[in-house]
Amino acid sequence: MHPARGARPCYTSPMNISLPIIQTQIPPDVIDLGLGNPPLSLLPLELIRDAAQVALSQDDNSFLQYGAEQGDGYLRLDMAKFLGGEYGFSVEPESLFITTGISNGLDLLCSLFTQAGDTIFVEEPSYFLALRIFADHQLNVVSIDTDENGLIPASLEEKLAEFRPKFLYVIPTFQNPTGHTLSQERRERLVQLAQKHDFIIAADEVYHLLSYTQQPPKSFAAYTDVENVISLGSFSKILAPGLRLGWIQAHANKINRLVTPGLLDSGGGLNPFTSAIVRGVIESGGLEKNIGKLRNIYRDQVRAMDEALRLHLPDVEYSIPHGGYFFWLRLSKDTDAAELRKRASSFKVDFRQGALFSSQGGLKNYMRLCFVQYEEEKIEEGVRRLKRCLDSAG
Ligand SMILES: Cc1ncc(COP(=O)(O)O)c(C=O)c1O
């Protein structure tokens, strides 16, 4: 178990054996403002049940066979149409490759395009569990500075003078943990630099479709006519993480490489059974509706968290996210959020310390809060507890 994930729940079976079911369970009296998971109450069981019923009551049982290496063709057709509508430019089914989520997509990219000891670039800060995947592949991780508009191209150019990275891992939209979005101008500059210096841009766009108050710039999918650009998407945050389903959009040359690993030779394309269910969710209009519902709920929760922070922690610096899951708080210079977190349990609140997201042991006076897990009153109560915890530091 990764220590940052916390204790796993155990359910006791009739035979008295403890079996974990979900990855992280929050103790009932704790408000965990750190956990970046959707709440169980927003995982759409009925939508999935209806689509599964349709898939399982037809005569075509081909989704029970080993699947095509690139992924379920019907799903790719549906997704191309759906993503085209959301993105505002056309998406070809041939440019899509089905994964079991972004984590799987990143692991595959590491397997296919890197070797142990290679250098990759990440943002500072970056998604801490992606850093774990890169550690599994024994990659040399070099970080690039960011600001309110995302990764800073000048910092990237500086590092490019020193290193030859295999890829740049970037979360361009509503970033984890900062909530910041890479500007259109910088996206274009990054693509130019990737071509000039021959590295891949692995754009993790897990939050791209979760926009609440401002449309983000164009997805990196718009640049996949360039061979170096890869866009990774996922159903985890727009439908349900337990589905383990996502996609990669890329240039034909990259797709041709993605379909060749031994993993797929032996096991076939990824997740054909779930793909058959999710294509029903898309065809019924359920995915679009679900995203609309999430946007409305999360928009209110952003407002609630902002109000609570302004009321209880007026000295803390942050910017209000326009989408995604997170607020990124800057505490006073001498606050060590990891130390603070040790005390948080006695105030029945939790968060994630900034240092988790740093690949250079920095960002000690930052913390990440997530606003999706709780309804508005609980968000306010959580921030109130956080204030008490901070006050106790003296
Ligand atoms: C930035 C980022 N990338 C990837 C993931 C995981 O995505 P998936 O469930 O598709 O593997 C998360 C989940 O929190 C995330 O925040």
Image (cartoon, rainbow, N blue to C red):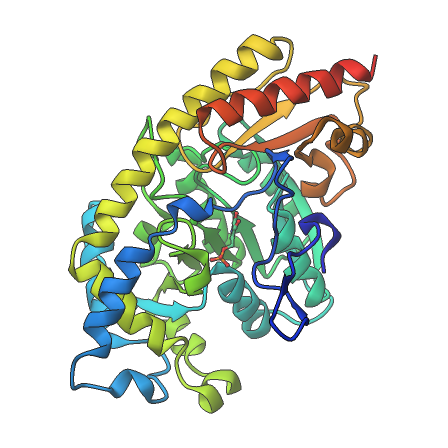
Residue 2 as seen in the image, left or right of residue 94: right
State whether residue 92 appears in this view: no
Q: Position of residue 142 (x, y in %)?
A: 69, 49
- Along the line of sight, the residue nearer the viewer: 343 or 198: 343
Quadrant into which the C terminus falls: top right
Residue 127 as seen in the image, left or right of residue 393: left
Q: Quadrant of residue 252?
A: bottom left
Q: 184 above or below 304?
A: below
Q: Quadrant of residue 246?
A: bottom left
State whether residue 200 appears in this view: yes
Q: Position of residue 373 (x, y in %)?
A: 50, 38
- Along the line of sight, the residue nearer the viewer: 128 or 24: 24
Q: Residue at x 74, y 21 (%)?
A: 389
Q: Quadrant of residue 181?
A: top left
- Along the line of sight, the residue nearer the viewer: 144 or 8: 8
Quadrant into which the N terminus falls: bottom right
Q: 390 above or below 378?
A: above
Q: Position of residue 24 (x, y in %)?
A: 61, 52
Q: Position of residue 16 (x, y in %)?
A: 68, 71
Q: Residue at x 46, y 55 (%)?
A: 195
Q: Residue furthest front?
A: 14
Q: Residue at x 60, y 8 (%)?
A: 314
Residue 203 as seen in the image, left or right of residue 289: right
